[in-house]
Amino acid sequence: MALSAKHLPLAGYSILLVENNPVIARSVADCLHDAGAYVLVAHETNDALRMADHPKLSAAVLDLELGDDDSTAVCRRLEERTIPFFFYSGYDDAYVSDRWPKATVVPKPAGEQVLISTLLQLMHR
């Protein structure tokens, strides 16, 4: 179910999406864009690190594994900048919490309302 044009809960926010699967990346990016966000999409670590320095970045949605790499360096960069993020991952919570115990994990697949509400909760803490 798409959001109506009148209801744009992410309007004015810039969201970094780091996802190596192009189908999932497109689906999540469309969801965030439809909710009003400006979305920066990275499929690999180097691009994600560059985009993590965007001056108006509000939050990030990260996949834990990025092909042969992972999002550890991106997480560190975001933490340095105090940019909230959550993992959108197919891995279980225990696997993620071993690496990032304070991070929120949203299991794949999740509906658009779950993604949007998680972002809003993180940005308004």
Image: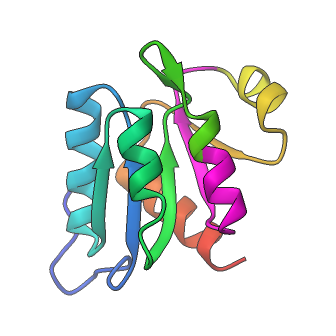
Magenta-colored span = 75-91
The quarter of the displayed image where residue 7 is located: bottom left
- In-front residue for pair 46/23: 46
Point out residue 74 in the picture as x, y percentages from the top left corner: 57, 44
Left or right side of 114 for 26: left
Instruction: Please say whether residue 18 is visible from this viewpoint.
Output: no
The quarter of the displayed image where residue 39 is located: bottom left
Among all residues in the image, which is located at the extreme top?
68
Left or right side of 9 for 73: right
Residue depicted at 23% across the width and 42% down the height:
27
Q: Quadrant of the C terminus?
A: bottom right
Residue 27 against residue 67 in the figure, above or below: below
Magenta stretch encompasses residue 33: no
Point out residue 59 in the picture as x, y percentages from the top left corner: 52, 65
Point out residue 122 in the picture as x, y percentages from the top left corner: 64, 67
Residue depicted at 71% across the width and 62% down the height:
80
Point out residue 95 in the picture as x, y percentages from the top left corner: 74, 20
Residue depicted at 56% across the width and 60% down the height:
118
Residue 81 against residue 16 in the figure, above or below: below
Instruction: Please say whether residue 70 is visible from this viewpoint.
Output: yes
